[in-house]
Amino acid sequence: MERALVIGGTRFIGRHLVEELLEHGYRVTLFNRGNRPNPFADHADVEHVRGDRTSGAAIAAAAEDAGADAVFDMVAYYPGEVEFATRYLAGSDAEIDAYVYVSSGDAYGVDEIPKREGETPLEPCSEEQAVDDSAETYGARKAAGDRKVFEAAEAGVRAMSVRPTIVYGPYDYTGRFEYWVDRVRTHDRILLPGDGTNIHHLVAVENAARALRLVAEEGEAGEAYNVGDRRVLTLGGVIETIADVLDRDVELVTTSARELAPADLELTDFPLYNPDVHILSTDRLARLGWDPLEPRDAIANAVDGPVDPERDPGPDREDEERVFEALGL
């Protein structure tokens, strides 16, 4: 493959995907509304086409004009968008070898450990959920998008799905990982929800980008591929690794729900805390030859940044200090 159409491509995961593709000799066309700055505006091998991703016809036309071998759909949040994109691509003169849809680990509907492609059930999605824009229906909509990928593959499109878990790394705008980097960088005492053994599988953005390219090149039509870091860290382990990268000696103070109550805090108020263990099997991806970064290296990249969080998603430090005070610290 030599040419790629990336739907989106200017923000977090999409930006890293473009860099990954360029490193492997691709010419890239970005397809988006142009509402955000284009970090590749001066790159000779990156073109930009303004367009509406809700229009399957516009996507197909952009793919045809770009001579794209692969289409990466980074910003499909509704199953109808996946359906229109694959339908119009199949009916166009574009000679597409791969359509790769970015789904989510949230597409899984049960708490199996680990969650496996083709075995662990997906979230159901009603007609109402399929067009809803709330966070509560995100997993259901992503699962429905996966089903549209499977239908497209049955119709002859080499369509595939990649399911990342929570992504961290440079240019992360969510603030979830940066919350803990900031705490370690600026405080000697860190308030840790639970006992520190909580596990929510994370994935470095570099590893997600590698997975997307590899699935386009080597994946099988109609298949989904989980992507999470090859080694799983506890939340306490993540914070300790951040401290090691920053060469900081910090005290982790574990807490229960009862101990957080005086500050009106709950365990789930803290970023990356999940009361249910969430682990994705990555064996299927590994069989394609996926070569991920080790967590410490990826965490070092994330700590170095740059990052520009849109919000601070965790408790205020003042509330944490109230908990320390109640604990006599």
Image (spheres, rainbow, N blue to C red):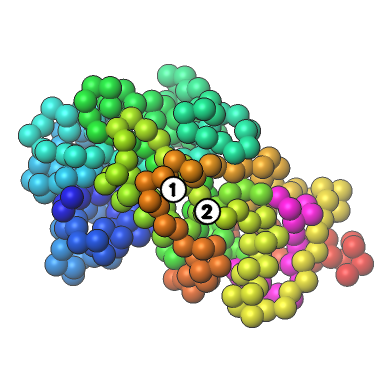
- Does the magenta run of residues contain 185? yes
Q: Position of residue 214 (x, y in %)?
A: 32, 49
Task: Return the residue found at the far bottom.
Answer: 247
Residue at x-position 59% and y-position 43%:
279
Other-residue count near label 2 (Cα within 10 Å), few / some / many at <14 / 14–19 / ≥20 = many
Please count the marks in the image: 2
Task: Return the residue found at the far top.
Answer: 127
| Magenta part of the chain | 181-198
In terms of image quadrants, where is residue 65?
A: top left
Q: Position of residue 221 (x, y in %)?
A: 29, 32
Q: Amino acid at mark 2?
A: Arg
Residue at x-position 82% and y-position 48%:
257
Q: Position of residue 47 (x, y in %)?
A: 15, 58
Which residue is disc 2 drawn over? Answer: 230
Other-residue count near label 1 (Cα within 10 Å), few / some / many at <14 / 14–19 / ≥20 = some
Left or right for 73, reference 244: left
| Residue 153, placed above or below residue 34 | above
**Badge 2 element:** loop
Residue at x-position 59% and y-position 75%:
245
User: Which of 219/143 is in front?
Assistant: 219
User: Which of 110/124 is in front?
Assistant: 110
- Does the magenta run of residues contain 239? no
Which residue is disc 1 drawn over? Answer: 286
Task: Return the residue found at the far right.
Answer: 328
